[in-house]
Image (cartoon, rainbow, N blue to C red):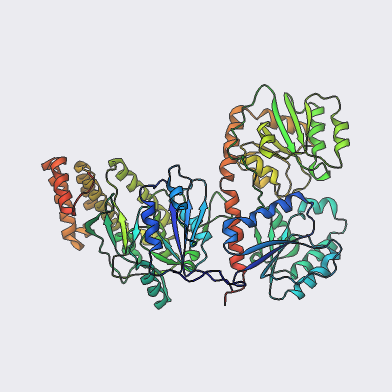
């Protein structure tokens, strides 16, 4: 009856004037053209929305709301979406032109699949590709793999069936009648909580396709205190997952924590706080030795980087680390 | 470039809002929500009026018919003909008026009234209530299954409410009340409470007009602290002159005034009827306006700090409410739309 688009793209926008045009162009340049792009103006204060309104493409829809945060903006976008398949793009990231076409084919060929994802490449603040590439498992994605390794990687990677999202929707605790998909009470780590809820509660099947189709921006700078906050938000996720899958959490939390702490140790190394990195590695090993057994190279490199930073001093280390990452990583 | 979307005539979902009474302020102003982008994206919406004396419903060029006319015995035939003459359409009844408190006051033969509701609801696909309390009552008296009933609060956009500075109460607390001067609104209880001294150090400002105006003025005579503001065309302007807003209604399916007051950061004092208490939360108090001791206790509890906290809570609870209600409508339309072919 209605001519609905094949895919709804949900893009929250909040004070991203430096990047949002690139993000939009990467959507409008998709080879699969049958989509709607829902831009959710999440009540920011910079020129982002003026930039968005500068695009005249009829496939763009703009929805404005008072600030709700990333999860709340994505939820509004999902609620306004018309397609049966929903793709998410954060407004500081980019897609390669084949992104939607390949995920659409993947989902159409596998009707039992709820989430299709692909690896991400990393780009720096200026949009230049870093040598780093995420190389996640693509098949046999179990809930414990999602918990420990998060193969989906980031919020701009997955393309998800609306029916899968609907299967884990819940009512907002403070706003009766507002349907939530992402948990709006989380201000970080809302992705991993959502993927776990989809996998555990919705029994949704995940699978990846090989090409790296998302360019995920790693911001330069940042503070060590953010690493601490990130760990706290991860603990908040564990607490939420425990509510519907206590046995699952009990079985896997030590290994997952070890991986999470190792990841945060790498973040601390990037930020130049090697003391914190070493502390996090110690905590990681105390939680579980399995990362060391399962991914010895990556684990040892993380340990070595933390120690090297200690010995070399932050400035020389940053120069060397920048070279190793393929160019100009922010300090 | 890309395939034409929604281009060809007839490929879009068509939704008709069917009204019978353009004079009813709240209902026709509430049509504005159907112009919201998120609803316009899923359906072409238009408004049509039912002739007041119509016995046979029109054939409508529509996939969804949203009926804003309350059912009644003499309209059952009309409803049946709407169903018969529009077999392709899903019909949604929006219940703007009937409530538990109204039924208790106004319906002499409850069994007959409830039978009429049950018959009417058999002729529609879905019922939208304007408050949770109304839905609970309607479900309990008609046995309508939960899947056929939704709650979507009504919304009319009043520019400037969310930007209004929070009230700064002075020596005298300014209590505002506005609406139609009729039995439903119960403003005489407020005036009587003022005259009995239950609202010490308060000014009462009443906006609106209606059949009971002469009665209100007679009750208020001689009190310099009661003022009539006349017809309200600028809600934000009126609320700017109030510290709190009172709704002493005898029945109230939802009470958009309470929503407007919360958007404006004004604490609400409401009577315990129908859709009013569920709007309160931390944003005000439920008060029995006929109990002067209770009225006095409520007013004296309103310190400037509490007024500020309630105002903020009301504003937080209504942030994005227009968008959320439009999204709920869009979701319901998606859910009920005939499956695309």
Relative to B285, residue A142 above or below: below
Would residue A164 appear left or right of B6 to someone viewing this image? left
* Count of marks, rendered view: 0
Q: Nearer the viewer, residue B33 or A307?
A: B33
Q: Position of residue A46 (x, y in %)?
A: 43, 43
Displayed quadrant of residue B94: bottom right
Question: Front-most of B108 and B275?
Answer: B275
Residue B204: quadrant of the picture = top right
Say if residue A150 shows up in the picture: no
Q: Whole-percent x and y of residue B52? A: 84, 61
Name the quadrant containing residue A143: bottom left
Q: Is residue A84 visible?
A: yes
Q: Is residue A200 left or right of residue A78?
A: left
Quarter of the image with the N terminus of chain B in it: bottom left
Q: Nearer the viewer, residue A267 or B287?
A: A267
Residue at x 43%, y 45% (from the top left corner): A47
Q: Taking B126 as reference, is B76 left or right?
A: right
Position of the C terminus of chain B, as image quadrant, is: bottom right
**Which x, y percent locates residue B208?**
78, 39
Q: Most extreme residue toward the top, as rendered?
A: B171
| x 52%, y 46%: residue | A66
In front here: A44 or A210? A44
From what the image shows, is residue B255 above or below residue B126? above
- Most extreme residue toward the left is A311
* Residue occupying the point 74% across, 33% down: B295
């Amino acid at each position: 009856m209605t001519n609905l688009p094949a895919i709804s793209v949900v893009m929250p926008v909040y004070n991203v004037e430096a990047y949002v045009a690139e993000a939009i162009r990467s959507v409008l340049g998709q080879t699969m053209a049958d989509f709607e792009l829902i831009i959710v103006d999440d009540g920011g204060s910079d020129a982002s929305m003026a930039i968005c309104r500068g695009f005249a493409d009829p496939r763009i829809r703009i929805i404005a709301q008072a600030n709700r945060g990333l999860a709340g903006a994505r939820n509004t976008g999902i609620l306004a979406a018309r397609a049966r398949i929903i793709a998410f793009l954060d407004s500081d990231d980019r897609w390669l032109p084949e992104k939607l076409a390949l995920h659409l084919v993947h989902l159409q060929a596998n009707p039992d699949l709820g989430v299709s994802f692909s690896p991400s490449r990393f780009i720096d603040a200026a949009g230049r590709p870093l040598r780093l590439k995420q190389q996640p498992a693509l098949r046999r994605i179990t809930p414990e793999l999602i918990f420990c390794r998060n193969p989906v990687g980031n919020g701009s990677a997955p393309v998800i069936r609306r029916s899968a999202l609907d299967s884990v929707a819940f009512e907002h605790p403070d706003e009766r009648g507002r349907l939530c998909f992402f948990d709006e009470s989380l201000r970080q780590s809302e992705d991993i909580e959502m993927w776990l809820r989809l996998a555990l509660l919705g029994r949704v099947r995940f699978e990846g396709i090989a090409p790296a189709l998302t360019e995920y921006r790693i911001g330069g700078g940042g503070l060590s205190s953010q690493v601490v906050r990130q760990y706290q938000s991860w603990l908040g996720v564990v607490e939420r997952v425990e509510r519907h899958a206590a046995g699952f959490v009990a079985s896997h939390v030590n290994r997952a924590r070890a991986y999470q702490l190792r990841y945060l140790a790498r973040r601390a190394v990037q930020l130049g706080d090697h003391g914190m990195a070493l502390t996090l590695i110690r905590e990681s090993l105390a939680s579980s030795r399995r990362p060391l057994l399962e991914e010895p190279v990556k684990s040892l490199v993380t340990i070595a980087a933390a120690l090297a930073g200690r010995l070399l001093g932050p400035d020389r280390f940053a120069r060397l680390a920048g070279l190793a990452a393929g160019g100009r990583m922010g300090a | 470039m890309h395939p034409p979307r929604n281009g060809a005539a007839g490929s879009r979902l068509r939704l008709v809002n069917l009204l019978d009474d353009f004079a009813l302020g709240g209902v026709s102003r509430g049509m504005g929500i159907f112009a919201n982008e998120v609803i316009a994206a899923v359906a072409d919406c238009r408004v049509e009026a039912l002739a007041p004396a119509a016995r046979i419903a029109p054939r409508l060029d529509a996939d969804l018919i949203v009926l804003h006319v309350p059912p009644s015995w003499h309209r059952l035939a009309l409803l049946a003909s709407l169903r018969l003459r529009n077999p392709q359409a899903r019909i949604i009844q929006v219940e703007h008026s009937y409530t538990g408190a109204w039924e208790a006051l106004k319906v002499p033969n409850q069994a007959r009234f409830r039978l009429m509701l049950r018959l009417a609801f058999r002729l529609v696909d879905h019922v939208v209530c304007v408050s949770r309390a109304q839905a609970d009552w309607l479900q309990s008296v008609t046995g309508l299954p939960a899947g056929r009933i939704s709650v979507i609060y009504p919304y009319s956009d009043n520019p400037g409410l969310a930007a209004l500075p929070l009230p700064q109460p002075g020596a005298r607390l300014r209590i505002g009340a506005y609406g139609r001067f009729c039995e439903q609104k119960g403003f005489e209880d407020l005036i009587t409470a003022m005259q009995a001294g239950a609202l010490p150090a308060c000014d009462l400002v009443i906006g609106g007009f209606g059949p009971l105006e002469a009665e209100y003025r007679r009750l208020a005579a001689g009190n310099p602290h009661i003022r009539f503001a006349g017809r309200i065309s600028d809600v934000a302007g009126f609320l700017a002159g109030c510290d709190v807003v009172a709704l002493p209604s005898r029945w109230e399916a939802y009470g958009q005034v309470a929503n407007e007051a919360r958007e404006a950061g004004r604490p609400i004092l409401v009577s315990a009827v129908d859709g009013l208490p569920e709007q309160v939360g931390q944003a005000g108090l439920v008060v029995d306006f006929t109990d002067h001791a209770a009225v006095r206790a409520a007013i004296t509890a309103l310190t400037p700090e509490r007024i500020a906290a309630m105002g903020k809570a009301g504003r937080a609870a209504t942030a994005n409410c227009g968008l959320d209600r439009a999204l709920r409508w869009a979701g319901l339309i998606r859910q009920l739309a005939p499956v695309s072919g």
